[in-house]
Amino acid sequence: MWSGVRPDADSHAAVSGGDWTEDLLTWAVTEALAAGMSCAQIAVQLGVPPPATRDHAAVTDHDWQDAIVAHENARAARLRDLSENPKFHTPTLD
């Protein structure tokens, strides 16, 4: 069962995992749902900010699912950029 503790998904190893990383996330979310966690609880564990809704409507599970996907896609893109351009993102001591 998913412990709710996220592995270091921002590491280089996670970036190079590709499909493996997506499979791990899919597995973790599936396990969390099977354990009775809501999409909102899973999103909090992943650090996903609350989704915006129209006219102050209630946030649905579908809204949370979309927010999780958008958050993880953005994180993966940032990590891919870091792995492709390490010098651009490495601070110097000059």
Image: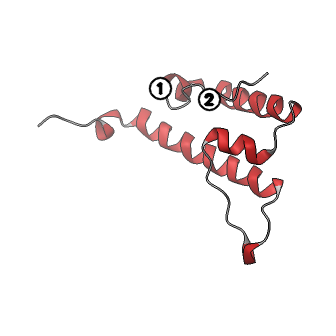
Question: Picture coordinates of residue 41 (x, y %)?
Answer: 74, 43
Of the 4 image quadrants, the one containing the C terminus is top left
Of the 4 image quadrants, the one containing the N terminus is top right
Q: Nearer the viewer, residue 74 or 1?
A: 1
Q: Nearer the viewer, residue 27 or 1?
A: 1
Disc 2 to disc 1, C-alpha distance: 15 Å
Residue type, label 2:
Arg
Q: Which residue is the site of mark 1?
A: 12
Q: Is residue 38 above or below residue 53?
A: above
Query: Is disc 2 surrounded by few (<14), some (14 to 19) or many (20+) residues within 10 Å?
Result: few
At horizontal 65% and vertical 51% (from top left) the residue drawn is 70
Which image quadrant for residue 82?
A: top left
Q: Residue furthest left?
A: 94
Question: Picture coordinates of residue 33 (x, y %)?
Answer: 84, 36
Q: Is residue 45 above or below residue 9?
A: below
Looking at the image, tell me whether mark 2 or mark 1 is earlier in sequence order: 2
Left or right position of 93 against 12: left
Q: Residue furthest bottom?
A: 55
Marks 2 & 1, CB-CB < 8 Å contact: no
At horizontal 82% and vertical 59% (from top left) the residue drawn is 60
Question: Picture coordinates of residue 75 (x, y %)?
Answer: 55, 43
Q: Nearer the viewer, residue 23 or 57?
A: 57
Q: Nearer the viewer, residue 24 or 29?
A: 29
Left or right position of 36 against 10: right
Left or right position of 57 against 92: right
Q: Which mark is residue 55?
A: none
Residue type, label 1:
His
Query: Is disc 1 surrounded by few (<14), some (14 to 19) or many (20+) residues within 10 Å?
Result: few
Q: Secondary structure at mark 1?
A: helix
At horizontal 75% and vertical 53% (from top left) the residue drawn is 64
Q: Secondary structure at mark 2?
A: loop
Q: Which residue is the site of mark 2?
A: 6
